Amino acid sequence: MTKKQHGSNSAAREVSNSNEQSGSRSRTDGPDALSPSLATVDSPPPAETGASRQHPPSSTQPTDMESAPGRPHAFQRASAFSVAQEQLTRVANAMDLDDNMREYLKMPRRELVVHFPVVMDDDSIRIFTGFRVHHNTALGPTKGGIRYHPDVTLDESRALAMWMTWKCALMNLPYGGAKGGVIVNPKELSERELQALTRRYTTEISLFIGPEMDIPAPDVGTNAQVMAWIMDTYSMHRGYSVPAVTTGKPLAVNGSAGREYATGLGITYITRAMLRRRMGLDIEDATVAIQGFGNVGSWTARSMHERGAQIVAVSDVGGAVYDERGLDPRHLKHYAEETGTVAGYPRADTLTNEELLALKVDVLVPAALEGQITGENAHKINARVIAEGANGPTTPEADRILEDKGALIIPDILCNAGGVVVSYFEWVQDLQAFSWDESDIRHQMKRKLLDNLDEVLAITVQTNQDLRTAAYTIAIQRIVDAVKYRGIYP
């Protein structure tokens, strides 16, 4: 490991606490307290400098794309949907699920592919391709993110929609799973181009979305501003405001307090509970490495740090940094916003993404893209706990290798469910036109996460199953029960 000089990259910024002063590693007054700055997460950052095309301060920062290390080459040849289906087959076998229900669950209900034009700043017309997939509607309308990324595919959207179905069912939310996106690098677009793309894509998929049909949310490459544009476009077509058509919106347009940091804070709640129950370890004594430093990774790092964990390594698309004494996530975030990457952070040593994954730490949080831990690199993982911050970061082959090594995998549909839980709260608030207090939202999110964790742990004790199988079993059984009572139409 060697020291790197300060980088000169520039990238669009995300809504964050960039105006905060860096501080030493500290603990909060209470076990669930949040730093005062969490009350002001909607404040815009300083204007961006050094880029030929500037994005709006609070709008066009990709949520996690900039901070997602590249996919392993082996996974580039794999199918995310095949991975999702293999996971379903494994659990269906454990449940002795009948063939009819397997057929019902293994394919999406609806798929939409759209090709649409956008007028660029130079007056040229560029054709973009987008997707929206609904996996299952047995429990209610579908819910899932919209992703702007060059690697978006229909296959990936199918897989992510399926994983969202299981996640919503596990959390006992009245949703099925959905996912969608556009093949685009949002960093290459101006603010006007990004808004035009978003509004046209929204129009193209408008027959697929709605507060009682399908409710999009932010994902990789999108954020609160993009959700506001989607909501406004949908509302213009209806002739009146429909805030409940999206979640993850800015507070100024009927967003929810706590939504921005919900996924990261939820990961911390679940990981802390699992460390105590399965490892006999307090989070204050844990070392943590985090792959990915977008919305999910940065808020996970910050909320764990504020509870005493030692964040020793972080990576993003530019590289990884390491300090065995612990990194300050707030100072690192400020640096990444200034330079466009964590790489070159002067207070840490340099690592590769592969070296970060292999660190001997208590907790590894893969919080980038799917398929990061595979059969090719799983044997190099030395973490005691893998807390899945991303969706589908571990392949079934890697699962088996890690289980043989004795690692504890906290599955994505449990570990990172805080985001969809608070999205549900936002949807309810919009439908009722009644806002909740932020402290109530945090309390209700924590209760829902830990209550469902208790159910998963109870299944593992009863059946001796791993956490993923137990979580999937609960989720799938809830859907099976709903189908049983609803029947198959006609």
Image (cartoon, helix red, strand yellow):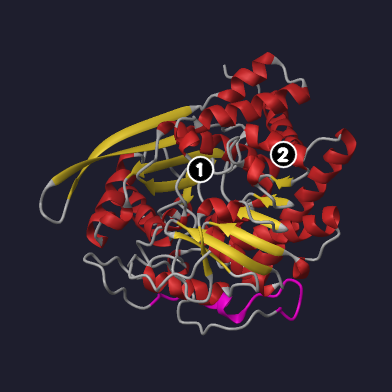
Taking 25 as reference, is 16 left or right?
A: left
Mark drawn on residue 426: none
Looking at this view, name the residue that lies furthest to the front. 2
Is residue 433 something that shows in the picture? no
The residue singled out by tag 2 in the image is: 468
Mark drawn on residue 212: 1
Contact (CB < 8 A) between labels 1 and 2?
A: no
Q: Residue at x 47, y 76 (%)?
A: 346
Q: Magenta span: helix, strand or loop, mainly? A: loop
Secondary structure under the numbered disc 2 in the rendered image: helix
Up/down of 33 relative to 299, above or below: below
**What crowding class fits label 2: few (fewer than 14 Cα within 10 Å), some (14-19), or many (20 or more)?**
some
Q: Residue at x 58, y 38 (%)?
A: 374
Whole-percent x, y for residue 481 in the image: 73, 29
Tell me where the magenta segment starts and ends, as one range.
27-45
Secondary structure under the numbered disc 1 in the rendered image: loop
Q: Earlier in the sequence, mark 1 or mark 2?
A: 1
Q: Amino acid at mark 2?
A: Arg
